Amino acid sequence: MGRKVNLGIIGAGRIGRVHAEHLAFRIREAELLAVADVFPPAAEKLAVDFRVETVYEDHRQLLRDDRIEAVVICSSTDTHAQMIEEAAAAGKHIFCEKPIALDLAEIDRALEAVERAGVKLQVGFNRRFDPSFRRVREIVASGKIGTPHILRITSRDPEPPPIEYVKVSGGIFLDMTIHDFDMARYLIGSEVEEVYAVGNVLVDPAIGEVGDIDTAVVTLRFANGVLGVIDNSRKAVYGYDQRVEVFGSAGMALVTNRTPDNAIVSDAEGVHAAKPLYFFVERYTEAYVEEMQAFVRCILEDTLPPVTGIDGRIPVVMGYAARKSYEENRPVRLEEISS
């Protein structure tokens, strides 16, 4: 039997439970030993459900646990950077959910701590690991559709998040579009140089009242000349809408929505099919498993994580550029955004 990586999870909320289940039951090379959460009942329930032997209320106790080689940070965004620094100082490899932080200076301090400690950091942009999106990346990189010209990404949630969450989320560009910014870089294999964003409040007036928008369109200009378009909505009544298209000089690669089944019924009233999967956890189950598998593998094989700290920083810069573009009604180059 091969070596296993001993891990601890910080944060026993929704995404913490997703990762805990996969580490406990679906990744053979992982051993989930501990969980920490400031709300003990959540940590205790996770421990019972996924057979985790040790529960801590303070994440620092988990970091002092000599058995643990790597940590998975699933706590609230405002704690990520600090926990990365503390985990790095403790010599633990780190998986951290996105974003690393909403402040670029905090991100830079966290990345410097990781560099000094010589540990690995992988950022949780799970969509890169979706089999369909990964296949599009392979097709583009192989040249099968020729030179890429246009990228289109549609990302629409089935329901807006609670207003209390919206208040602390950093806004739509740093909370929702950030996934699409990362996907754009990943699919095209080039950096974005300029963004232009427009938006409105068309779903819920309460979102506007707290200073955010719920509907947005962002255009991207890549360094290699590709043009991109991202459209976002906080509410698609038919389900979780996740589509991608890359058009090139010799063809096109397209990913449509995942549905519970692919049965199509044709009758006198029309042609009917199942709605897209409703919840992001269902849509990206395979991606969540594969991203955590990749994190464990990079530790075992001593390789670079597939989504690095810099990959975590750049979409935050893009989010701030999009916000600035929306507020000033003009294209914004990423070089205008500083810490």
Image (tube, rainbow, N blue to C red):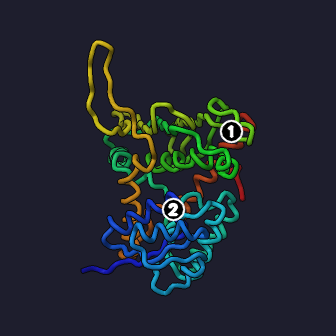
Q: Residue at x 71, y 36 (%)?
A: 208
Sequence-wise first label, 2 or 1? 2
Residue 313 placed where, x, y %? 59, 59
The quadrant in which residue 129 appears is: bottom left
Residue beneath disc 1: 207
Indicate the amino acid at tag 1: Ile
Q: Is residue 271 left or right of residue 14?
A: left
Q: Is residue 314 left or right of residue 247?
A: right
Q: Residue at x 50, y 39 (%)?
A: 155
Indicate the amino acid at tag 2: Val
Residue 85: in sight, yes or no?
yes
Residue occupying the far left of the picture: 1
Q: Is residue 79 left or right of residue 283?
A: right
The residue closer to the viewer here, 239 or 180, is 239
Residue 116: in sight, yes or no?
no
Q: Residue at x 65, y 33 (%)?
A: 204
Residue 10 placed where, x, y %? 54, 70
Mark 1 closeness class: few <14, some 14–19, many ≥20 residues within 10 Å: many
